[in-house]
Image (cartoon, grey):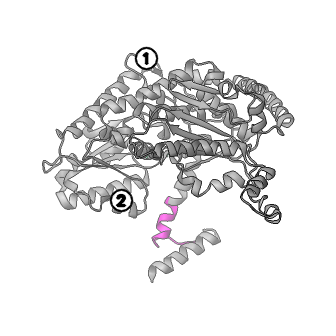
Amino acid sequence: MTAARDAVFARLAEHRNATEGVSLRELFAADPKRFETFSAAQDDLLYDFSKTHLTAETLNLLVELAKAADVEGQRDAMFSGEKINTTENRAVLHTALRAPEGSRILVDGEDVMPLVLAERAKAAAFAEAVRSGELRGATGETFTDIVNIGIGGSDLGPAMAAIALSPYAQDGLTGHFVSNVDGAHISDTLKGLDPARTLILVASKTFTTLETMSNAKAARAWLVEKLGEDAVAKHFAAISTNAEAVAAFGMDTERMFQFWDWVGGRYSLWSVIGLSFEILIGAKNFQAFLDGAHEIDAHFRLTPLKENIPVLMGLVGVWHRNICGWPSHAVLPYDQRLARFAAYLQQLDMESNGKSVTREGAPVTTKTGPVVWGEPGTNGQHAFYQLLHQGTDVVPADILMAAVPHESVGDQHAMLLANALAQGEAFMRGRTTAEAAEVLRKAGKSEAEIAALSPHKTFPGSRPTAAIAYRTLDPRTLGRLIALYEHKVFVQGVIWGINSFDQWGVELGKELASRLIPVVKGEAPTDGLDGSTKGLVEHLAALRAD
Ligand code: G6Q
């Protein structure tokens, strides 16, 4: 399989050599149907990759690459519950979490759907009881503030989704998300909250994560100080796969919501990890969010590769990363409520595909995951876009936009869309030195000024972007967007031959931090530390002693 894949990679590289000089402007000039040919839709959601350098030949080769790497076989293995996360010997079934009633999905011969549906119903009933005021705190007050304590996969998803879907949140309910072990985070969050009206969800797959356990202890102490020990049961709930650890922490397992080891942390917001934002938006909207993702699951399973949006997104990314050699990928939503979307995708993509060995443990022979980053437009335009337009690196980007906003504030939505479209156009077209000179000439500049300024006003252009356009950022569409990126990451992981579902790279830092805690506290010697770490420990200790 690797040999077949590498043979296609070699042909793609030759193809790139032969076509590298052709600009995006030239591609559009040569083919008036380029937009129609290089775009794909799922209902209202459109993926337009015509502003990349792909030609019909490139796309054919990339589809051959996907076939050679057995993307379809691996995809079917994932959906059917095979243990494709080989280093942890686990199935990968976040797709089961959004499967509808009536589905049957087997892990080790057992159908997981009854468990999934029961937990989904339990979470929905809890969310609705909090929203209606049926479920109250120890003093009989209704809850107004929901604090989710978790980190990484147990934080980024619900925190991102709570912002994205804020128009759907119930009035009078506010979500808060605490992740960092920096005491500033929990302190700033709890400051000003009324414990009698605060519900605290401790979200941790393992229920052993240092940050989450420390913050949970701090929150517990804050609550107990104000309301007494007996209030804990009414103000806390746990979300975990580890019932023993929940009990050991002193929390009632009756108030525990479960998920399973076949749900990876960064793929878990479809599970009860989504409870905090389900409380905010309600069970019906949460179900629409799951249904949206399920639509994309069906699209990914059933659509031919050339029209399959996550496959296309993955292939375009492989083209940019492996064949063009570009190391980073920007996500630029022209949709303010996707403010944390890039941060969410950063974990999804970089933790999944930031790997250097194949599934078999051999060193990879291709580059793997790019650096993923981004901020909403138009803000980014006034900050880092300078480098995107005129810097020495090419940074391919996704530009996201909604046709219909939730608010109409004058004609601001038209302005937002115009900016999104203008940026895509500017990256594609650029501005030649002759064009820059012409603009300066029209502005009445002297020939000397034109000669001096035109190089600075030249834009290379031919910088690729893809657009993702949808009707509106509703729960269904957020579910669709996330699922698209999940499957994109999957497709790329298969092509690179890596396991996208483990995260051993996170472990070393955790181990070393545990070893250094007593050293930083001054309870263990600095012996054996490297010179820099030792020097820093001593410098910090001296400052703290002042
Ligand atoms: C996700 C990662 C990681 C994980 C956090 C929190 O895929 O494994 O981000 O989600 O380390 O872990 P717990 O949920 O176990 O606290």
Instruction: Using the image as rendered, state which of residue 444 and residue 106 is in the foreground.
Output: 444
Residue 244 x %, y % = 34, 41
Q: Residue furthest bottom?
A: 546
Q: In the rendered image, is residue 240 in sight? A: yes
Residue 517 forms part of the magenta stretch: yes
Q: Residues within 10 Å of mark 1 (few under 14, many from 20)?
A: some
Could you tell me the amino acid type at mark 1?
Answer: Arg
Residue 92 forms part of the magenta stretch: no
Q: In the rendered image, is residue 89 in sight? A: no
Residue 494 x %, y % = 65, 31
Instruction: Using the image as rendered, state which of residue 116 and residue 442 is in the foreground.
Output: 442
Residue 18 x %, y % = 86, 34
Question: From the viewer's perspective, is residue 109 above or below residue 176?
Answer: above
Task: Give the quarter of the figure containing the C terminus.
Answer: bottom left
Residue appearing at x 46%, y 20% in the figure: 106
Disc 1 target residue: 104
The image quarter in which residue 82 lies: top right
Of the image marks 2 and 1, the number of the one nearer the N terminus: 1
Instruction: Using the image as rendered, state which of residue 456 and residue 156 is in the foreground.
Output: 456
Numbered label attached to residue 186: 2
Q: Which residues are magenta?
A: 514-527
Task: Give the CA separation, mark 2 to mark 1.
Answer: 41 Å
Left or right, 205 with respect to 73, comes to left
Could you tell me the amino acid type at mark 2?
Answer: Ile
Instruction: Using the image as rendered, state which of residue 4 and residue 278 is in the foreground.
Output: 278
Q: Is mark 1 within 8 Å of ligand 1?
A: no
User: Element type at marker 1?
Assistant: loop
Task: Give the quarter of the figure containing the N terminus.
Answer: top right
